[in-house]
Image (cartoon, grey):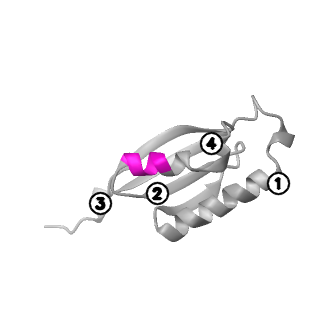
Amino acid sequence: MQFLTLSRRRTDAFPAEAFTSELVSQEAHRIKELYIAGILRQVWRRSDMPGAAILWEAASEAEVRNACESLPIFKAGMLEIVAFVPLEPYAGFAPSK
């Protein structure tokens, strides 16, 4: 099953300098691990605010939530998941009868 998350960095509660290069590097490393593991399918930076849109593939919502909670910026309390959407296949691509 696939899931879409939208996150935002909590820049309202943390100054820009709190998002250190070390923390961002740890985040990038964890994102790569999740990609290699096959749970994270695609990731985009948001252009409307600091944050990301991530396409996940997992057996359960709990698996995706655990992956989100493993992100270093999330662990630091500096990232908020603002939308968590389970996705279903588009019926228009199904074979016609």
Do the residues bearing badges 2 and 4 touch, measured as CB atoms within 8 Å?
no
Q: Which mark is residue 75?
A: 4
Q: Earlier in the sequence, mark 2 or mark 4?
A: 2
Residue 23 in the image: above or below residue 40: above
Q: Earlier in the sequence, mark 1 or mark 3?
A: 1
SS at badge 1: helix
In three-dimensional space, the C-alpha distance between marks 1 and 4, rounded to whole angstroms, equals: 16 Å
Question: Quarter of the image containing the N terminus?
Answer: bottom left
What residue is shown at x 82% (from left), y 40% (from top)? 18
SS at badge 3: helix
In three-dimensional space, the C-alpha distance between marks 1 and 3, rounded to whole angstroms, equals: 44 Å
| Identity, as a three-letter code, of the amino acid under mark 2 | Trp
Question: Quarter of the image containing the C terminus?
Answer: bottom left
SS at badge 4: helix
What residue is shown at x 83% (from left), y 35% (from top)? 15
CA neighbours of label 4 inside 10 A, class few (<14), some (14 to 19), many (20+): few
Q: Earlier in the sequence, mark 2 or mark 1?
A: 1
| Identity, as a three-letter code, of the amino acid under mark 1 | Ser
User: Which residue corresponds to mark 2?
Assistant: 56
Residue located farthest toward the left when viewing the structure as drawn: 97
Magenta region, residue range: 61-66
CA neighbours of label 1 inside 10 A, class few (<14), some (14 to 19), many (20+): few
Query: Majority secondary structure of the magenta segment?
Result: helix
Residue 57 location, x and y as percent? Answer: 41, 59
In three-dimensional space, the C-alpha distance between marks 4 and 3, rounded to whole angstroms, equals: 39 Å
Residue 69 location, x and y as percent? Answer: 54, 45
User: Which residue corresponds to mark 1?
Assistant: 21
| Identity, as a three-letter code, of the amino acid under mark 4 | Lys
In three-dimensional space, the C-alpha distance between marks 2 and 3, rounded to whole angstroms, equals: 22 Å
| Identity, as a three-letter code, of the amino acid under mark 3 | Gly
User: Which residue corresponds to mark 3?
Assistant: 92
Do the residues bearing badges 2 and 1 touch, measured as CB atoms within 8 Å?
no
